[in-house]
Image (spheres, helix red, strand yellow):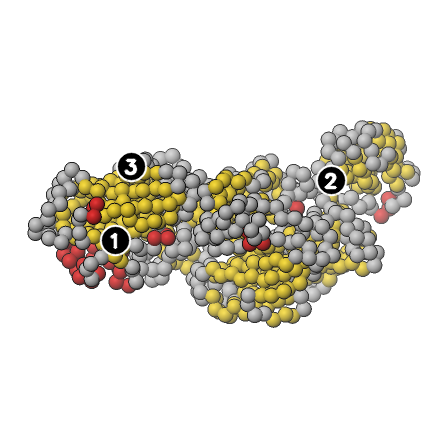
């Protein structure tokens, strides 16, 4: 055991305010208690916790059994603060044993310290031989999950001494819970000695625990103080931390801990920075995007590094259909960009602000609105050296054309080729794999204006150190209108860089409560993504009950194909705490949210939370990523959200271009009837001397349904397609696409 003079409670009480209840001055108490614990251990005591649980409350009664009369007792009780709320003490020794001191140390974070010294150390009348109740802690449930209440060495070590100042060995046991708790703190090892001395905890850090015998892996996220805990069975485990940014390095990534008889030592996991710069992270989110309505745009930003960010600046580009009404921070406007001077940002701190915006009243239902934000500082970490070309893309409507611009805005010429692809709705329209531009050079691509959505996606040259793709789009043009709004959100946002965020949303006429949304939605009816697509989830909730909801809890079970180590929690509508449990469930808890019922105050009855996550790099092609969340309002529920699902594919579209070669422009493809619910007549006109033609039917998601030879210029067939919608017929000659026609099937 650790002597009290070196224990955490001693250090903390000497360096921080600690609200206490007791009769003695704390300094005198600590001095006398250190005298008691200066002697070697003698005998054994047993602390047992009896849990009594109802649907809404939990009581934890602590009983002490010892072979001798005692002079001093010190222990900590911890609990899961996202499951239980502390309601205080029910009784203290049945109010018959005096001189009790209960220190309430950060009760909202799950910690209470129990302190007692005998008022008459030479003539103590209390006999613990048969076991004596010490105290009963009372809790209220804020989530209907398992109640974890346990003894712990944090913030005070467990120590008991007899009347002769001899320290006893202590055995702890919690009834109704099989196993033990591994808990500890991830701390900023400022002097790099891998020893904890009141150093700052690292919040929102992933901790991984692996059972050595079975290889079973558990993961948790530290709280705002860097603390974590795992309920586990007896055994030996390997424990480590994981920083996805590569900014921090752990002291010992092979540290082992053994749980025996339900007990485990408190773990201190130190990390120190490997780069002397700041790593900034920004995310944006919106709850509502109804035309003609005002709504809040939330921006959260974090300094993930170990160095103060100097002269940090945030920039935001609103969608053209959005206007700014007000901001929580002063700003400067330059063109379409808003600039916010943030000053210096402390290491490991998270900040947020909101902008009130309004969507234009003439916005088309389902229209896509995209916003961009970024953050930088004078001492931001560099993404790496790159002295070659970088593609920037833009688009605009010009008369009867949509014009796409590709510009080299990099620090040099393109030594390696880049590529781009243009899609019409969700089908490949044009593709070029050999784009080479000198510095500041520009390439222009024009296509005829239609009411469809056209999207250009550019891939940066190989070796580029940032995000490898970027895109621009047009949902039709003013001269022709739009017939397919909302398609852009099916595609990746390509905003994986921590200091850049792009948010694209489709406006809606109604607000849907208790819904889980994903960006991207995935291409086509299969919702296709690749293994490198970052998914952004927004869970929106609304209190449709009559009473005010004081606590909202959201449970979101991660798909087995998503990598929990890449979780980044973004903006939320209200202050929120969160963790990841051993079963891969990320839990968001809004305490004291006081959400009114929808019928009382509809605008204030809703909220949301956002987070991003990546698939595992080796997630198998063909696997589905599925999940839904459940929501509780003051223990009422569960209210289930819809299910999101994505299909992992190597290529989310067929990359065969639909535009024909110029020398085949006289060839015409006729399809009738169109639309059709039955047999199709396909004719190739102006075929000339072209023989050995082939036809291919492709669904609107780029998936080839079938391909066959055309021995005649006209053939008849019944499409083997089960879903109504737009399809494409492509004609090939010697492997080249020479013609294309659209077909609308009715099923």
Pointer 2 or 3: first along the chain: 3
- Residue 515: x %, y % from top left: 58, 44
**Secondary-structure class at tag 1:** strand
**Secondary-structure class at tag 3:** loop
Residue in the picture at 53% in, 55% down: 573
- Residue 581: x %, y % from top left: 43, 43
How far is the residue under mark 1 from the one under mark 2? 68 Å
Q: Which residue is mark 3?
A: 175
Q: Residue furthest left?
A: 122
Camera-nearest label, 1 or 2: 1
Residue in the picture at 66% in, 46% down: 490
Pointer 3 or 1: first along the chain: 1
Q: Which residue is mark 2?
A: 700
Camera-nearest label, 2 or 3: 3
Q: Which residue is mark 1?
A: 102
- 545 vs 704, left or right, is left
Can residue 364 be seen in the rendering of this structure? yes
Quarter placement of the C terminus:
top right
- 412 vs 162, left or right, is right
Q: How many neighbours does mark 2 have within 10 angstroms: few (below 14), some (14-19), or many (20 or more)?
A: many
Can residue 179 be seen in the rendering of this structure? no
C-beta proximity under 8 Å, tags 2 and 3: no
């Amino acid at each position: 055991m650790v002597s009290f003079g070196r224990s955490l409670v001693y250090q903390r009480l000497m360096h921080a305010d600690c609200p206490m209840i007791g009769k003695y001055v704390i300094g005198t108490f600590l001095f006398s208690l250190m005298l008691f614990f200066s002697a070697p251990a003698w005998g054994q005591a047993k602390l047992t916790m009896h849990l009594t649980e109802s649907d809404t409350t939990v009581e934890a009664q602590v009983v002490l059994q010892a072979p001798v009369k005692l002079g001093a007792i010190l222990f900590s009780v911890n609990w899961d603060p996202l499951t239980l709320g502390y309601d205080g003490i029910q009784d203290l020794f049945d109010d018959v044993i005096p001189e009790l001191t209960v220190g309430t140390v950060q009760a909202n974070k799950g910690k209470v310290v129990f302190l007692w010294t005998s008022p008459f150390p030479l003539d103590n009348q209390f006999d613990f031989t048969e076991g004596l109740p010490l105290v009963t802690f009372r809790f209220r449930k804020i989530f209907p999950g398992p109640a974890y209440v346990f003894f712990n060495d944090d913030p005070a070590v467990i120590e008991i001494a007899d009347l002769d100042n001899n320290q006893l060995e202590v055995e702890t046991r919690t009834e109704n819970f099989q196993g033990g708790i591994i808990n500890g703190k991830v701390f900023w090892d400022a002097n790099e000695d891998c020893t904890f001395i009141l150093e700052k905890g690292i919040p929102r850090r992933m901790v991984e625990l692996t059972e050595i015998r079975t290889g079973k892996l558990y993961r948790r996220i530290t709280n705002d103080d860097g603390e974590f805990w795992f309920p586990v069975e007896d055994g030996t485990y390997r424990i480590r931390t994981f920083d996805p940014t590569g900014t921090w390095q752990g002291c010992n990534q092979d540290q082992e801990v053994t749980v025996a008889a339900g007990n485990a030592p408190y773990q201190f996991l130190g990390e120190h920075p490997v780069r002397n710069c700041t790593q900034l992270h920004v995310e944006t989110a919106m709850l509502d995007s109804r035309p003609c309505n005002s709504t809040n745009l939330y921006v959260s930003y974090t300094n993930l590094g170990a160095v103060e960010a100097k002269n940090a600046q945030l920039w935001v580009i609103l969608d053209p259909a959005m206007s700014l009404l007000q901001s929580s921070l002063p700003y400067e406007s330059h063109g379409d960009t808003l600039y916010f001077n943030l000053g210096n940002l402390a290491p490991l701190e998270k900040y947020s602000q909101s902008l009130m915006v309004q969507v234009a009243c003439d916005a088309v239902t389902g229209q896509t609105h995209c916003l961009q934000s970024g953050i930088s500082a004078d001492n931001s970490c560099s993404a790496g050296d790159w002295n070659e070309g970088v593609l920037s893309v833009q688009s605009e409507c010009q008369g009867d054309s949509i014009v796409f611009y590709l510009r080299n805005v990099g620090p040099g010429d393109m030594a390696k080729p880049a590529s781009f692809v243009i899609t019409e709705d969700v089908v490949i329209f044009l593709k070029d794999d050999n784009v080479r531009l000198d510095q500041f050079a520009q390439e222009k691509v024009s296509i005829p204006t239609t009411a469809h959505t056209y999207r250009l996606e550019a891939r940066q040259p190989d070796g580029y150190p940032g995000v490898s793709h970027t895109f621009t789009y047009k949902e039709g043009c003013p001269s022709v209108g739009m017939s397919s709004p909302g398609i852009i959100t099916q595609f990746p946002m390509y905003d994986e860089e921590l200091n850049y965020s792009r948010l694209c949303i489709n406006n809606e006429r109604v607000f849907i409560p208790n819904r889980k949304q994903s960006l991207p939605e995935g291409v086509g009816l299969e919702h296709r993504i690749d293994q490198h697509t970052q998914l952004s989830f927004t869970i929106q909730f609304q209190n449709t009950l009559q009473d005010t909801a004081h606590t909202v809890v959201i449970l979101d079970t991660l798909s087995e194909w998503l990598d929990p180590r890449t979780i980044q929690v973004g903006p939320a509508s209200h202050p929120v705490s969160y963790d990841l449990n051993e079963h891969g469930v990320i839990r968001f808890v809004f305490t004291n949210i006081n959400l009114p019922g929808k019928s009382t105050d509809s605008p204030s009855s809703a909220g949301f939370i956002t987070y991003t996550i990546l698939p595992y790099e080796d997630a198998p092609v063909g696997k589905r990523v599925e999940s839904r969340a459940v929501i509780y309002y003051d223990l009422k529920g569960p209210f289930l959200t819809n299910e999101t699902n994505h299909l992992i594919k190597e290529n989310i579209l067929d990359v065969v271009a639909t535009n024909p070669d110029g020398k085949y422009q006289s060839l015409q493809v006729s399809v009738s009837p169109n639309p059709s619910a039955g047999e199709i007549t396909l004719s190739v006109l102006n075929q000339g001397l072209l023989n050995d033609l082939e036809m291919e039917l492709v669904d609107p998601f780029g998936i080839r349904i079938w391909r066959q030879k055309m021995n005649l210029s006209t053939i008849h067939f019944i499409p083997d397609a089960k879903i109504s919608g737009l399809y494409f017929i492509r004609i090939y000659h010697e492997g080249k696409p020479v013609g294309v026609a659209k077909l609308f099937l009715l099923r």
